[in-house]
Image (spheres, rainbow, N blue to C red):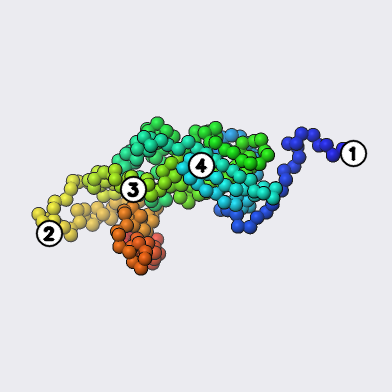
Amino acid sequence: MSGFRGPWEDWPPARPIRVEGGIKARSKRGAIGEQWWSRRFIGVLESCGLSGRLARGRSYARAGQVLDFRLSQGKVTARVQGSRVRPYDARIGVLPLTRPQWLRVQERQAARALFRAKLLAGEMPHEIEDVFAECGTPLFPRSASDLDMHCSCPDWGVPCKHLAAVCYVLAEEFDRDPFAMLAWRGKARDELLAALRKLQPGAHQDARAAGRAGALPFDGPAAPLAESPAEFWSARLSPARLRALSAPAGSPAPDLLLRMFPPPPVPVRGQQLAEVLAPAYHRLAADAGPGQADGV
């Protein structure tokens, strides 16, 4: 009797070779991607409608079949272990922003005082999409067709399960570090922050923006110390008004100030001062307990 079973698509999928030490998705069931920006990226992937391949891709990601991946400007490359001995090479490309586009984005980001603080705290501001749109380029790919995806496997479908696995692992990397999304679009973390520091508005503009965001109201610059020494240590708001101000949602990272500003050029036993101080900030926050660290 012949072993013919009809079109090759009818054959059951081959089982992948299990590996040790691969990159496993943290999500064990359900959707992958915790933050709104990673879910937006996954939404682009899932808009292609290849639900079967995407489901197998999630299984690959959770099983650790992605051996490694490297993110660079406009490109992610990875190796994925499939059913053959040799891992498959996967590549996901996106068109990076041009230099003039990035200049426009940076100018608009610098004009919004809290953008850099939120990014440094591990949060992608919702308004960042508007900034990119105003500059004539979307932050996220508009559809799967905006992604240039290739895999060395014999599957004709795009994305195949290997590419899908890489996308799901990439989404969790975006969860962990929102700067990774911006680096993929062409601007690495340190380069972007250095540009924002050069372009950031003056202290008065920062204070006005902070007031709009719910921080202390801005009522004009303080008088120079030499002109009003008695007022230097006095609060500009009454204790009752200070208590009435609502605390911001969520606690900022304990070492946020260290990350916001350039580290002072003071080496301590071969380490930068900020690297030495960061663990101490975290210990202070832990000792203070929830709700108390903000007042330290």
Residue at image location 12% in from the left, 59% down from the top: 230
Amino acid marked by disc 2:
Ala
Amino acid marked by disc 3:
Ala
Q: Residues within 10 Å of mark 1 (few under 14, many from 20)?
A: few
Which residue position is annotated with label 1?
1
CA distance separating discs 2 and 3: 38 Å
Q: Residues within 10 Å of mark 4 (few under 14, many from 20)?
A: many
Q: Residues within 10 Å of mark 2 (few under 14, many from 20)?
A: few
User: Residue 218 placed where, x, y %?
Assistant: 22, 46
Tell me which label, 3 or 4, sits earlier in the chain. 4
Q: The N terminus is located in which quarter?
A: top right
Q: Residues within 10 Å of mark 3 (few under 14, many from 20)?
A: few
CA distance separating discs 4 and 2: 58 Å
Which residue position is annotated with label 4?
75
Give the number of marks.
4
Amino acid marked by disc 1:
Met
Which residue position is annotated with label 3?
194
Residue at the right extreme?
A: 1
Which residue position is annotated with label 2?
230
Q: Nearer the viewer, residue 72 or 19?
A: 72
Residue at image location 42% in from the left, 46% down from the top: 188
Tell me which label, 2 or 3, sits earlier in the chain. 3
Tell me which label, 4 or 2, sits earlier in the chain. 4
